[in-house]
């Protein structure tokens, strides 16, 4: 792989750490800023919403900018956003800083995938994109627990300083290693995105993505307080448990791709069913340290195992229903993932603030995943109904 790919991988690592590290620091941030846990949970929601709505809009608006200057500008914005988070004197300023970082996040992954593919021969494009996204996976395995540990020992602001420093390293890597002569793909305008959103079949898949992926975040957003207040783990143990969860995520992501290769709908039905069951079980096992670790390993595996299948399925349907906007559909599905994070984090905060409390977040998340399962079954039935007339027509022609 060209060294430029590794510059993109470092940037993806920094961005992935910035997005998810706040999960392990919610109790610390809430205590320092004197806010409730549900309000702290909105820090996750606001970031995800920034990616959801900022990515497609800003990608369309920045389509005319040369690729290398655009990436450098994005990493500069990312570093500024995390520096502002480290310096934020209040909760409101912290929210604004998170939105700035989120804008950089969304556009980076939209543009970075195209650049990674262009840096290698055609037969290695998938590997190049996978290498870039490896930074995101490694961030979940190492960046999040390390960032959580830094925040618990030196304060949550130190974590954001460290993430900002990663952004500076990524900026230097891109400036040094990325060639200045990168081809620009034709940018998708806002009208193209509206056309994709006009497809009922694709809207079903976007809803599957938001609910199936986001259901886990009802509980995952508040995982640190669950582990400390319900299970009884010490604050120092949380970062180690996040390593276990991250390793399970990485394994699940790879396995999910292999499972979904041949029939993504069938794979998603099985994965969503298991995911809903494990979330429901977590409501009962959260009180036991040993059972919690086993449940979290299973939940980590399942929570990201559906990602490849969802992305593959939306591309397959886009080729059939919106063949001129497959890339736009793929990008909007990425936005749906982040909309799911925002929805899950917000709903989790609402549950925590209600009479149900922390212990209810897993089974409420299970309900969201169950709805995604029903949507998947519905979409699969629509696929079979569409395929049936084609088979009948082919049979008549053969006669």
Image: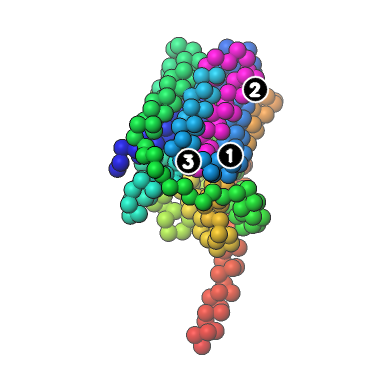
Residue 253 at least partly seen = no
Figure check: 196 above or below 80:
below
Tell me the residue that label 3 is attached to. Answer: 66
Q: Position of residue 248 (x, y in %)?
A: 40, 36
Decide which of tag 2 and tag 3 comes sooner along the chain.
2
Pick the residue in front: 398 or 251: 398
Residue at horizontal 54%, vertical 24%? 81
Task: Quickly name the residue at label 2.
Answer: 39
Q: Position of residue 333 (x, y in %)?
A: 55, 47
For label 1, count other residues whose C-alpha is less than 10 Å away and answer few (under 14), some (14-19) or many (20+): some
Q: Which label is found at residue 222?
A: none
Q: Position of residue 292 (x, y in %)?
A: 47, 29
Indicate which disc, 1 or 3, sits on the residue closer to the N terminus: 1
**Image disc number at residue 58:** 1
Magenta includes 107? yes
Q: Secondary structure at mark 3?
A: loop
Q: CA distance from mark 1 to mark 2?
A: 27 Å
Q: Are marks 1 and 3 in contact (CB under 8 Å)?
A: no
Judging depth in this view, the residue of 110 and 156 nearest the camera is 110
| Residues in magenta, as a range | 85-111
């Amino acid at each position: 792989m060209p060294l430029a790919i590794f510059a993109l991988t470092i940037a993806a690592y920094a961005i992935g750490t910035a997005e998810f590290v706040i999960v392990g620091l919610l109790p610390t941030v809430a205590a320092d800023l004197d806010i409730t846990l549900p309000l702290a949970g909105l820090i996750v929601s606001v970031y995800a919403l920034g990616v959801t709505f900022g990515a497609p809009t800003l990608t369309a608006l920045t389509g005319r900018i040369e690729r290398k200057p655009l990436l450098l500008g994005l990493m500069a914005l990312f570093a500024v956003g995390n520096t502002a988070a480290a310096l934020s004197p209040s909760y409101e300023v912290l929210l604004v800083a998170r939105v700035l970082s989120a804008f950089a996040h969304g556009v980076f992954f939209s543009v970075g995938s195209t650049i990674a593919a262009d840096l290698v021969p055609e037969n290695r494009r998938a590997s190049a994109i996978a290498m870039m996204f490896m930074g995101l996976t490694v961030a979940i395995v190492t960046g999040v627990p390390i960032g959580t540990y830094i925040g618990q020992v030196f304060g949550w602001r130190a974590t954001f300083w460290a993430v900002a420093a990663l952004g500076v390293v990524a900026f230097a890597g891109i400036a040094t290693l990325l060639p200045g002569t990168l081809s620009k793909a034709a940018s998708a305008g806002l009208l193209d995105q509206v056309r994709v959103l006009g497809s009922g079949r694709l809207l079903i898949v976007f809803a599957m993505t938001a609910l199936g992926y986001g259901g886990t975040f009802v509980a995952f957003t508040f995982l640190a307080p669950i582990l400390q207040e319900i299970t009884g783990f010490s604050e120092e143990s949380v970062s180690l448990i996040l390593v276990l969860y991250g390793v399970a995520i990485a394994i699940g992501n790879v396995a999910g791709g292999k499972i979904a290769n041949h029939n993504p709908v069938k794979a998603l039905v099985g994965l969503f069913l298991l995911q809903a069951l494990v979330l429901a079980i977590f409501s009962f096992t959260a009180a036991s340290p040993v059972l919690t670790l086993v449940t979290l390993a299973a939940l980590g595996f399942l929570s990201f195992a559906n990602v490849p299948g969802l992305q593959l399925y939306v591309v397959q349907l886009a080729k059939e229903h919106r063949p001129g906007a497959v890339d736009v559909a793929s990008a909007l599905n990425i936005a749906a993932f982040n909309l799911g994070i925002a929805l899950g984090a917000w709903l989790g905060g609402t549950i925590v603030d209600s009479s149900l409390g922390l212990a209810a977040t897993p089974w409420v998340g299970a309900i969201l995943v169950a709805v995604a399962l029903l949507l998947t079954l519905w979409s699969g039935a629509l696929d079979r109904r569409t395929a049936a007339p084609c088979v009948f027509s082919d049979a008549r022609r053969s006669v």
